[in-house]
Structure formats: structure tokens, C-alpha cells
Amino acid sequence: MNPRVFDKLKTLADAAKFDVSCASSGTSRSNPQKGIGSAAGWGICHSFTEDGRCVSLLKIMLTNHCIYDCAYCLNRRSNDIPRATFAVSELVELTLEFYRRNYIEGLFLSSGIVRNADYTMERMVRVAKDLRLQHRYNGYIHLKSIPGASREWVAEAGLYADRLSCNIEMPSEQSLKIIAPDKDYQSVFRPMHYIQQGFLQGKEEKKKYRHAPRFAPAGQSTQMIIGATPDDDNRILHLAHSLYQRPAMKRVYYSGYIHLNTYDTRLPALPAPPLVRENRLYQADWLMRFYHFGVDEIVNEVHPNLELELDPKLSWALRNPQVFPVDIQTADYEMLLRVPGIGVKSAQLILTSRKYGRLTSENLRKIGVVMKRAKYFITCRELPAFTVQEARPEYVRRMLLSPKHKENKQLAIDFDHALLPLRSNV
Amino acid sequence: MLYFLYDRTFDGLLTAVFDAFNRKEFPNRIVDQAIAIPLFTDTFSVITDVEKSKRVFIALKKKISTSALNMLFVCYLSEMEDVEMMIFRYIQKALASPISIELNFADNDVLSLSKIYKKVQNEAMHIKQFVRFQKTGDGMYFAVVDPLYDVLPLCSDFFEDRYADQIWLIYDARRHYGLYYDKKQTEQIHFETPPAFAIQKGRLTAEQQDETERIFQALWKDYLKSTTIQARKNLRLQRQFMPRRFWKYLVEKQ
Ligand code: SF4
């Protein structure tokens, strides 16, 4: 291996690191012809960086040269930084060697734009194609679709990638035009649409012939940057909601803005990335996808922003005390899910366990219900009723906000962990 | 006090269940026959019999689902103190109950076993995450692990499927055995004494390594360094997801 690869790796991993990487999930493919690799149906984290992020994929850029000049991006044309470009063969070898040592689940490849969108896409696709066809590699591949890429290259990328993504970047087109003047929603939504078409068509064909070529079986994802523009959470979550209506859209990522190009006055000089807000958005996203919440219940004209000091589920519960307390013994699944302190797992355990008898608060605690929160919103066998009805929402809020309350710990209990993704380049 | 002594195999444990029912004599504890037994304890030595264990298995199959059966095996791999009695009581209750008990989490044994199951599965997951293969001079991929529970049997399909075209060995330093895959099948190999590489803390010496090994290890470390975002540094979080006890065999933590 060429010694220059060391420098390239540093430069291009550094350049790619602001990208979301957690997700390598969504595909299950075993390895029937005894090549190398399989994609387990869930994403495996093989290491964790010092910032606590999951390292699952070799997340790297093919090149950090770029003809565009997006305000938030380190690799923008006007920055004077070290630039590097991988040869296709170098990247292929690096991926395989890391993979064989169980360092990674696969490759997450993005790129700065050289010459034009299609020229760039072609080279990215070649990496994926060589891995699959020459090396019989079955591990995970995520390719970033370049904004403005044509249907031909998106179609080809879909043949080899497990997931494709195309970042919407800003929560509104107006913001995008100010901050990334070379991009517009058209250049993002068109490739997104090609991916969706390929995905649906691939599924259709799979029904007809067992050996039909697959097309990005893990669908697509997208990402937007939070806190760089005045867009409120109402705007952000409604956009996310509408994106989730698209059949191939699996994940929307939110990434707290990091102020890197400090000289650019179009951007706010945030002293630190808005991590709490980012986290609240993920929680709200979770509520939409797994807790059967409608987006309007979470944010609306009256409540355009998520509360920072309370998670959105608790916040909703305190705004709607009239639906509580919930009787653990009789409430349906949907209602159980709405109780602060009860997650998807514990709601399911309650459903199955209560058939055998009446549940006590001790049973609930063992099942994993966070009683400290739940007690204000439920009645069960012997719990003395001091619910949100008697206590009033203001009191409950104060109790659950006590200074001892370790906010971040609390987050991890109700919701899935390890989702600390970041923001993106292309 | 009545102790049943068994050979620590799963078949042995199921044989113990069979014998208890057969003799109408129920143990207070079921323990490894190799441990020292306290004074004034009655003992009964279980002689592992595959026929007996099969009969228990078939009887159980009529009462609980395959995944609950699998759960019992996984819990047994925990090697936790007195997990045998929990499994014993679970089986007793399962056989006695007209409906499956497996979802009755208000029952202490059902709940405890479900928690142990989760712990063992987590440990198996950790092995899948944190195995780091080193390539040897003759082209074998080799890793040392030190799992809390005996989870290699739960990982073998995963590695076999993923690394189907390379020869590999994963060695359990705590239990002195390994999984060895020769591109055709995986087998367990046992070691009388810990092999040399285990004593070297799992590191291959320069002569034992493939010549490219050093380079890819260095590239991997460089990669992790470059991909870290200093503005978000959070070592507590890192340790929470990647507990320290795994660090000794992680290339990136050397
Ligand atoms: S975000 Fe992408 S297109 Fe914009 S400057 Fe950065 S690398 Fe180039």
C-alpha cells in the first residue's frame, strides 16, 4: 500500500466526519456464495470514538476537492485546506482489509464535487461496483448521491449500494439558497425521486423473479442541519413528516450546526452545537415513527418549538392532562405508549403480563417502567393515586425538573440510545 | 439440603430435571460436580444421559415456544451462580401450567431469566462488535476474547457467514477454547494449556504477523483519530458503549 494513503486517509476521514454514520441497518443479506461479508439486519457498532459516536462504517470521502461553496462546509471551494483524492483501488483495498479484521460493517462513501455531479457519481459507483463484482464483497455500502446527479448514475448506484442518501441540508429552500447558493431543492429532490422509483421498481421485480437485481434494499435517508437558520421545529418536523410519507425514506437525520467557517457572516456564531435541541428532535422523530404520535400533536402553530428542558413526550402529557391517569390493567397499547416512563418494550411487556393477573407497581418497575415519571400518569393495583389530575401539571413539571435530574441519562432510558449523529457535507 | 451434582453440560442439566421428577426428589441446588460440597449436605450425582434430556426437551416443547427453549439454553451459558435452579424451577412451572408461562413476567423466575438472557445476548453482541482479527504470516485471521459468559457458541454462525472466505480462529482466554473455521466448517478446539499468543495478551509478535498487519492497524488508529469530533468529546459516553474490560484486546486502544 502506497505510503501516501496514510495522509489521504487522515485528510479524507477528517473531511467526512461531520456526516451521519450510525445507520448501517436495514439490510439483511447472508453470504451464500462464500465471498466475503454479510449485512446483519441491524447495524453493529465496532468501535466508539472519543465523542461517543458509534463507528460502524468506514466513513470517508473519495475526494475533498469541491467546486461548490456551501457556507457550512469545511471543504468548500474558498477554504484553504489540504486536499486529497483516493484512487478507486486504494479505497477498495482499505475497505476490504478493515472489513476482514472486523473493524467495520462496511463503507459509507461521499465526495466533494469534481467537474460535475455525474463525473463524481461515476467514480463513487466504481468503488462500489469493484467491491461487489471483483471482490464478491457482501458487506454494507452506503453511497451519497451527489445533488444534481442524473437518473442513469443514480440507477447504477442503486445496483451496488444498500442505501443511498441525498441530503436536503436545510429545513427550507429559502435557507438552502442563502447558505448553499449552488444547490436548490430541485437538485436534491430529483435524485431522491429517482431513488424512490428504483426502489419501488426493484421491489416489484423481486416479486416476479427471484433473481431480479436488487436496488438499494435499505432504501434512502436524508439529513438536515439544525440551528444554522431561523427555521423552527414546527417547520423541521413537518418537513420530516412529509419525507417519511415517501415509500423508500427510512431515516431523517438532524444534525446540530457546528460553526466551522467562522468568517462567514451568513451563519450564526454558535459557541457550541445545539446538541439538546438535536436530541429533542430525534425524540420527536421517534414519537412519530414508533409511538404513533401525529406531527401536529408534537409541534404546531401554538407550540412551534420543542421544549428544551423536557422531552417531547412528557411535554405533550403535561399539555394534555385530561387524558390521564391511564389504567395499566385496561388501557390499550396506543395509550400505554403515551405514558411518560413507558417505552415500546415495557408497553409490550405490560400487555402480555397483565393477562396473568393484576400488575403491581413493583411488577411495573421490574418490567422496566420508569416509575418516577410514570406514577403521575397511571393507576395500577395499589398505587395511591396522586396523579397529574390531583397534582396539577405545574407540580409534576417541577418535580421532574429537579436539579438532580441528569438530563442526558434520562434521555437514554425512554428512547433508543447511540443516536448521536452529526451533520453532513454532500 | 439436597445438592444435585452435574457435569455442567446442558444435557446434564436436563437430565437432572428428569431424575428429579423420576425420583420425586427435588434439589435445593444443582451444582458443578467439581466444586467442594459443604458438610452435612445430601448429594445426588446426575449421570448425563442424552435420552433423558431429550425426553425433557420433548415434554417442554409441548408447553413453551422454540424461542423460550432457546432462551433457557442461552441462560445456561451465563454460568451464573444458581442459574441452574432458576432453569429447573422454570421447567417445573412450565410443565405444570396448562398455558405457556413464558410471558408471565410477574413470575420471578420468568423475569430473572429474561434478564439473564438479555445480558448473555448483550455479551454475545459485544463479541461480534469488538473482535479484532490480526492476520498471521500464514494467512490466518486470529483474535482473542475474554467474555463474561460463555458466548462463543452464540457467535459462531455470525462469523462463519461473514468471513466465509478466510481462515480464522477466535480464542476464549477465560475458558481456554476457541472457534476455528477452515473455510468449510467451524469447530471448537480445546487447549490443554493457554497457547503462547494468549500469554502475549493476544498480540502477535512481529514474526508471527503478516507483513501488512502493522500498516492496517496503524491506518485503523489514524482513521479513528481523524473521525473524532473534538467539539463533542465525551469520554464517559465512549466508556458506556465500549466498556473498559474490552480494551485490552482492541487494536485501537493499544
Ligand atoms: S457541502 Fe458538499 S457540495 Fe457543498 S462545499 Fe461541501 S463538499 Fe462541496
Image: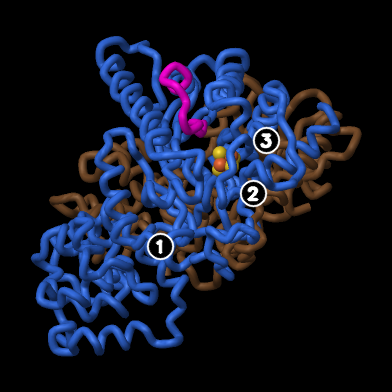
Chain colours: A blue, B brown
Residue A424: percent from left, percent from top: 53, 46
Residue that carries the numbered disc 3 in the rendered image: A65
Q: Name the residue: 29% across, 60% down.
A: A234
Q: CA distance from mark 2 to mark 1?
A: 21 Å
Residue that carries the numbered disc 2 in the rendered image: A74
Q: Name the residue: 36% across, 35% down.
A: A189
Q: Name the residue: 18% across, 64% down.
A: A336
Mark 2 belongs to which subunit?
A
Residue B216: percent from left, percent from top: 77, 36
**N-term-proximal mark, 3 vs 2:** 3
Q: Can residue B202 be seen by looking at this rendering?
A: yes
Q: Quarter of the image holding residue B105?
A: bottom left
Q: Amino acid at mark 3?
A: His
Q: Please, what secondary structure does the residue beneath circle 3 have?
A: loop
Q: Quarter of the image holding residue A219?
A: top left
Indicate yes or no: mark 2 CB to ligand 1 under 8 Å. yes
Q: CA distance from mark 3 to mark 2?
A: 11 Å
Q: Are marks 3 and 1 in contact (CB under 8 Å)?
A: no
Q: Is residue B159 magenta?
A: no
Q: Name the residue: 15% across, 51% down.
A: B99
Q: CA distance from mark 3 to mark 1?
A: 30 Å
Quadrant holding ligand 1? top right
- Against B201, residue A116 (above or below) is above
Magenta residue span: A142-154
| Most foreground residue, A177 or A153 | A177
Residue A230 got which mark? Answer: 1
- Against A322, residue B234 (above or below) is above
